[in-house]
Image (cartoon, rainbow, N blue to C red):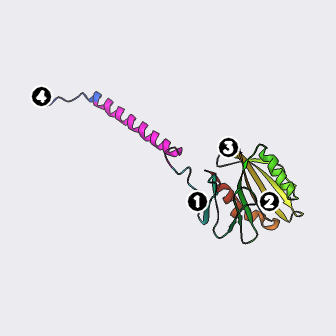
Amino acid sequence: MPGAPDRPPRKRRIGLLTLIGVALVVVVVAVVGYFALGLGSTTATLPCSLGGYTAFTSPDHTFCLDYPTGWQVMNPSRGSGAQFSGPAHQVFTAANLGAYSGTAAGFDRAVCLNLGGIAGLPITLTLAGQTWTQRLCFLDADHYRTIIESSVYQGKLYHMDYGSATLTFLSNRSQFFTPMEQSFRFL
């Protein structure tokens, strides 16, 4: 038609729209992947945060975890961390014990034996992407049970243990100890 503006051919316009669409998808996938992996977000390093629990960050700022609101907090017998005590004689300790050249499994066994307990077999588990060893320790003719866990992380020994009377151990473990253990994060 005379006087009508020239339009680009339809195939060329479809190709350009397809190219723009593909570029947009690539950008969206890259941004979503960046944040999903925690590279562009602080959520990967935020303190622990369970409902009904209180966040705790170690005095040396190397780890955090959550503990039940209302539990007592004291200094651990060794290292930088805390000992948490519940109203029914539940105890949970988490601490950075500093430089360590031994094995985590050997440490767990030694702690149980030093308490006068009988050490179970070591188990390997993963908490927050880090390998830990775990050992069940039977104390006081099996009237008291404790779990001892440790991990050597960046050359330092991190230790958690938790326990209660044998009769209430399983319910304490599911209600309190496991959520505390699972909330542990290195900072």
Return the x and y of residue 167 as percentages of the image width and height: 81, 67
Q: Which residue is mark 1?
A: 49
Residue lying at 59% horizontally and 57% vertically, measured from the top left? 48
Which numbered disc, 3 or 2, marks the residue that appears first in the sequence? 2
**Position of residue 14 in the picture relative to residue 97 (left or right):** left
Assess whether mark 3 and mark 4 are in contact (beta carbons under 8 angstroms). Answer: no
Return the x and y of residue 123 as percentages of the image width and height: 78, 48
Mark toward the viewer: 4 or 2: 2
Residue lying at 46% horizontally and 39% vertically, measured from the top left? 30
Q: Is residue 165 found inside the magenta-colored segment of the image? A: no
Residue found farthest to the left: 3
- Looking at numbered disc 2 in the image, what kind of residue is underneath it? Thr
Q: Is residue 14 found inside the magenta-colored segment of the image? A: yes
Q: Which residue is mark 3?
A: 154
The quadrant in which the N terminus is found is top left
Look at the image and give the residue range highlighted in magenta. Answer: 13-41
Mark toward the viewer: 4 or 3: 3
Assess whether mark 3 and mark 1 are in contact (beta carbons under 8 angstroms). Answer: no
Mark toward the viewer: 1 or 3: 3
Which numbered disc, 1 or 4, marks the residue that appears first in the sequence? 4
Which numbered disc, 4 or 3, marks the residue that appears first in the sequence? 4
**Position of residue 112 in the picture relative to residue 17 (left or right):** right
- Looking at numbered disc 3 in the image, what kind of residue is underneath it? Gln
Mark toward the viewer: 3 or 2: 3
* In-front residue for pair 165/92: 92
